[in-house]
């Protein structure tokens, strides 16, 4: 019987990620994609080998917009607790959302963004009850 030892649920979400060592002298910097995220950690696919124990700051492009128009990034800091040839796990010590200075252009809604509309299924109404725009991350092989 398998027993889950993690204290936080993991959510499979693919986001573009940029990571850099907290202590710049180590020279650890790179890009990758998240595999899953929880309130306690991240699993990131990366082309570089990252050593266990190093503290990293990871910036991820968040797929939802604040108030439907302001782009967000999730910035997390933590320690690498597991590293393999193509991925590493980061135990988080801090994370926060930050706004991005670029402005969302409504004309580009059809390029790289899709609109999600929720409807009230209980009444059978097709009236929109919520509208959110999501950036669809590009998947690379």
Image (cartoon, rainbow, N blue to C red):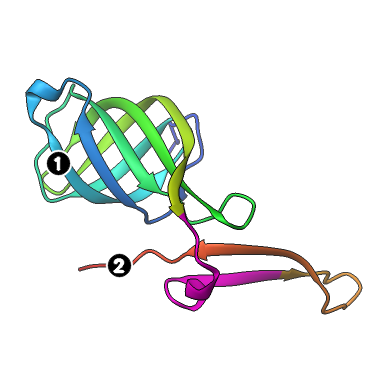
Residue 34's tag is none
Q: Secondary structure at mark 2?
A: loop
Q: Nearer the viewer, residue 60 or 11?
A: 60
The residue wearing badge 1 is 84
What percent of the width, then of the height, locates residue 48? 10, 45
* Camera sees residue 95: yes
- Is residue 111 depicted above or below 8 in this figure? below
What is the span of residues highlighted in magenta in the rendered image? 103-117
Q: In the image, 132: left or right of 139?
A: right
What percent of the width, then of the height, locates residue 59? 33, 40
Membership of 108 in magenta stretch: yes
- Is residue 10 depicted above or below 77 in this figure? below
Picture quadrant where residue 51 is located:
top left
Q: Nearer the viewer, residue 129 or 36?
A: 129
The residue wearing badge 2 is 139
Q: Secondary structure at mark 1?
A: loop
Q: In the image, 75: left or right of 9?
A: left
- Is residue 13 depicted above or below 73 in this figure? below
Q: Earlier in the sequence, mark 2 or mark 1?
A: 1
Q: CA distance from mark 2 to mark 1?
A: 21 Å
Residue drawn 34% across the image and 27% down it: 77
């Amino acid at each position: 019987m398998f027993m889950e030892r993690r204290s936080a649920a993991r959510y499979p979400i693919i986001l573009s990620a940029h990571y850099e060592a907290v202590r710049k002298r180590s020279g650890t910097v790179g890009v990758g994609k998240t595999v899953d995220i929880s309130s306690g950690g991240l699993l990131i696919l990366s082309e570089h080998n990252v050593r266990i124990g190093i503290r990293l700051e990871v910036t991820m492009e968040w797929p939802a917009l604040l108030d439907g128009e302001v782009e967000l990034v999730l910035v997390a800091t933590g320690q690498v607790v597991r590293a393999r040839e193509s991925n590493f796990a980061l135990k988080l010590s801090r994370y926060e959302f930050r706004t991005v200075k670029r402005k969302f252009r409504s004309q580009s809604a059809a390029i790289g963004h899709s609109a999600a509309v929720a409807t009230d299924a209980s009444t059978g109404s097709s009236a929109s009850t919520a509208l959110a725009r999501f950036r669809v991350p590009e998947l690379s092989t």
